[in-house]
Amino acid sequence: RKESFLNIKVLVWNLDHWKSKNRLLGWEFIQKINPDIALLNECPASQVGFNSVHHIQSADWGAGIFSPHYRIDEVKIDCCHPEALVIGDTVINSKTIRSISLYGRIIDGFSITTLHRSLSDLTPIFTSDENRELLLIGGDFNASIQCDERMPSFKGDKSHHLFFERLKNFRLYDCLEKFHSGRIQTLRHSTSNYPWQNDYLFASKELFDKCFGCEVIDETSLYSVSDHNPIIANFDI
């Protein structure tokens, strides 16, 4: 019998909640995009009635996984920064996708330290056979190999490079890199014209192979919502 596939859409976006001038417009854009899974950072609770698992960092914003269509079952682990790390299982087309919304929380001037701790906390998830084939991890990592090149903390600093090497070591693959060479700007920094990429979507090999498109959306209409550009990826599962 011929296997039937379902196209699913995944959104990654930092909603810049604490600086955003137009928060409702952000949720309206998400509704328009109509993602099956949205990995959001610096976001409040859903203002449009989405299913969600949401961890609060400060005030009413944090990291979360959202879906207008599917239930999300939280997967709990012991971790150093639960306010910046959310794991959820979503059943789509009779298959369980395990999604991770990861935020590179900055503490004492560093995000890379919290990211490395979070990857260590995620090791049991990455190395387990349970739902390992259909795994997504995305978010505003506040990290880039560009940081090692342009603003290292000390001479020869490769801490950002090592973070991405760790992701590769867990057999996770960069969805944007599949369709674009080099870095793609996702952050419009108020004090820098350099095209920083802080936001990413990585997938396990099976999902990566099923990814047929991954783009950064740069729309001026969204500039009042966030200084980050959304990432949208499509998969056949």
Image (cartoon, helix red, strand yellow):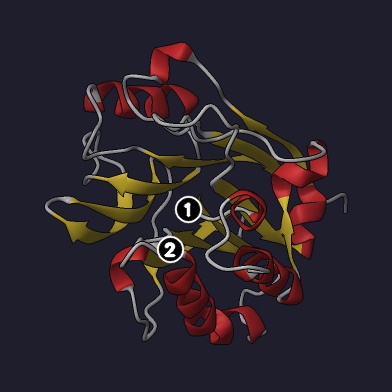
Q: Is residue 165 visible?
A: yes
Mark seen at residue 142: 1
Q: Which amino acid is tagged 1?
A: Asn
Query: Is 161 in front, or is 94?
Result: 161
- Circles 2 and 1 in contact, beta carbons < 8 Å: yes
Quarter of the image where one finds residue 57: bottom left
Would residue 27 appear left or right of 69 to someone viewing this image?
left
Badge 2: residue crowd in 10 Å (few <14, some 14–19, many ≥20): some
Q: Secondary structure at mark 2?
A: loop
Q: Which residue occupies 68% across, 69% down?
A: 156
Classify 31 as above or below 135: above
Nearer to the camera, 230 or 92: 230
Name the residue nearer the viewer: 203 or 229: 229
**Residue 154 in which image quadrant:** bottom right
Q: Position of residue 167 (x, y in %)?
A: 67, 69
On the image, the x and y values in percent for residue 73 come to: 38, 66
Residue 223 in the image: state x and y as whole percent.
Answer: 39, 20
- In this rendering, is residue 227 above or below 162? above
Q: Measuring from the top left, give residue 158's x and y in whole percent.
A: 66, 68
Task: Point out the residue furthest to the top here.
Answer: 221
The span from disc 2 to disc 1 (Cα, nearest Å) is: 6 Å
Other residues around mark 1 within 10 Å, as few (<14) / some (14–19) / many (≥20): many
Name the residue furthest front.
Answer: 155
Rendered image: mark on residue 111: 2
What residue is rendered at 36% in x and 86% in y? 78
Q: Is residue 7 left or right of residue 63?
A: right
